[in-house]
Amino acid sequence: MPKMKTHKGTAKRFRKTGSGKIMRAKAFKSHILTKKSPKRIRGFRQETELAASDVKTVSQRMGK
C-alpha cells in the first residue's frame, strides 16, 4: 500500500510542538485593523492550541 501524502495546505497552516500539541494562527488579523484595538491586534500574533475536536482530522492530514 502506498504512503499517505501530507496535505500541503494543512502543513502550511499548522505546526506540531515538541510535546505533540497542534498549534494554529489566530483569525481576523489581516485587514480592517483600524477599528481593532492595539491590544487586540497584538493578541493575534500569538499562536493558540487547536481545538480538541479538530486534532484528529488535522493530524491525519498532516500525515503524522
Image (spheres, rainbow, N blue to C red):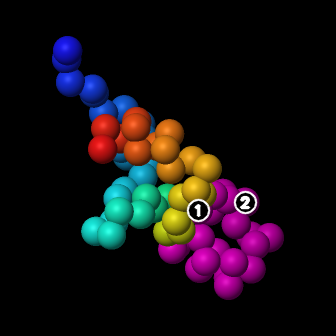
Residue shown at 57%/47% (left/top)?
54
Report the span colored magenta. Answer: 26-46
Estimate how packed mark 1 is, as few (under 14), some (14 to 19) or many (20 or more) residues with alpha carbons within 10 Å: few
Image coordinates of residue 52 in percent, x first then y, are 58, 56
- Badge 1 amino acid: Lys
Q: Residue at x 60, y 57 (%)?
A: 51
Looking at the image, residue 31 sits to the left or right of residue 1; the answer is right
Disc 2 on helix, strand or loop? loop
The residue carrying mark 2 is: 32
Whether residue 30 is visible to the viewer of this picture, yes or no, is: no
Quarter of the image holding residue 50?
A: bottom right
Q: Where is residue 17 drawn, in percent x and y?
A: 33, 66
The percent position of residue 31, horizontal first and vertical second, equals: 66, 57
* 1 and 2 marks in contact (CB < 8 Å): no
Marks 1, 2: nearer the viewer: 1
Res 3 → quadrant: top left
The residue to which callout 1 is attached is 26
Q: CA distance from mark 1 to mark 2?
A: 15 Å
Task: Tell me, yes or no, whether the highlighted magenta stretch contains residue 40.
Answer: yes
Q: Which quadrant: the N terminus?
A: top left
Residue 31 in the image: above or below residue 6: below
Which SS class for mark 1? loop
* Residue 52 visible to the viewer: yes
**Residue 5 point in image, percent of width and height:** 28, 27
Q: Is residue 25 above or below residue 4?
A: below
Nearer the observer, 11 or 50: 50
